[in-house]
Image (cartoon, rainbow, N blue to C red):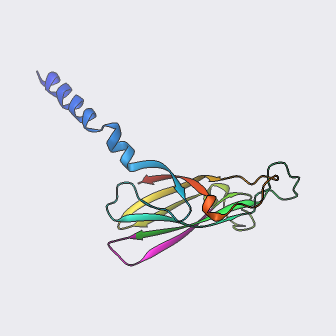
């Protein structure tokens, strides 16, 4: 009888951890330039894609430097007036962060409203092409993995 009761409690506990509750704490988001999104698991935290600088070597070009794409993000909370500025980078980021490890240029852990988050920059689009003129900033999107820790 004790085993049956334990099994029922176990099944109910597993069902309570549905995919929706897990998805809420970790999300992959595509964010447009100047767009603001809510942080997962936060009622008051927001993240804004504030700025982009793209010096990556264009598709079809022969370059002596791979270049990089840097993204500035603004973290804010409606509960406080303080915000945080974060810069993430994809590509050859050693010139920006000469003492940083490779992963630290596209990944950061931050704290907002007593909640820690991991932000991982996975893509900056569109990728420059030799056949096109430079893109307007409004054309850019980023892909971020946002995790509530």
User: Which residue is found at the position 83% from the left and 59% from the top?
Assistant: 65
Q: In terms of depth relative to the viewer, which is nearer, 51 or 95?
A: 51
Quadrant containing the C terminus is: bottom left
Count the labels in the image.
0
Q: Is residue 99 magenta?
A: no
Farthest residue in the left direction?
1
Q: Is residue 108 left or right of residue 67?
A: left
Q: Is residue 15 placed above or below 113 in the rendered structure?
A: above
Name the image quarter holding residue 107: bottom right
Q: Is residue 15 placed above or below 88 in the rendered structure?
A: above
Chain part drawn in magenta:
77-88
On the image, the x and y values in percent for residue 83 come to 45, 74
Q: Is residue 79 magenta?
A: yes
User: Which residue is found at the position 21% from the left and 32% from the top?
Assistant: 12
Q: Is residue 3 left or right of residue 100?
A: left
On the image, the x and y values in percent for residue 71 come to 61, 64
Quadrant containing the N terminus is: top left
User: Which residue is found at the position 13% from the left and 24% from the top?
Assistant: 2
User: Which residue is found at the position 51% from the left and 57% from the top?
Assistant: 119
On the image, the x and y values in percent for residue 13 come to 23, 35
Name the image quarter holding residue 37: bottom left
On the image, the x and y values in percent for residue 55 come to 75, 62
């Amino acid at each position: 009888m004790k085993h049956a009761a334990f099994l029922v409690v176990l099944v109910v506990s597993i069902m309570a951890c549905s995919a929706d509750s897990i998805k809420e704490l970790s999300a992959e988001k595509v964010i447009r330039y100047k767009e603001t999104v809510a942080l997962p698991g936060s009622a008051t935290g927001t993240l804004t894609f504030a700025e982009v600088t793209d010096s990556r070597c264009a598709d079809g070009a022969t370059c002596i430097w791979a270049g990089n794409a840097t993204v500035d993000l603004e973290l804010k909370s409606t509960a406080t007036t303080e915000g945080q500025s974060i810069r993430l980078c994809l590509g050859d980021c050693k010139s920006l962060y000469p003492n940083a490890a490779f992963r630290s240029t596209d990944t950061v852990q931050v704290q907002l409203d007593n909640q820690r988050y991991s932000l991982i920059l996975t893509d900056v689009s569109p990728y420059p092409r030799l056949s096109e003129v430079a893109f307007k900033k409004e054309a850019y999107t980023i892909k971020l993995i946002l995790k509530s820790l």
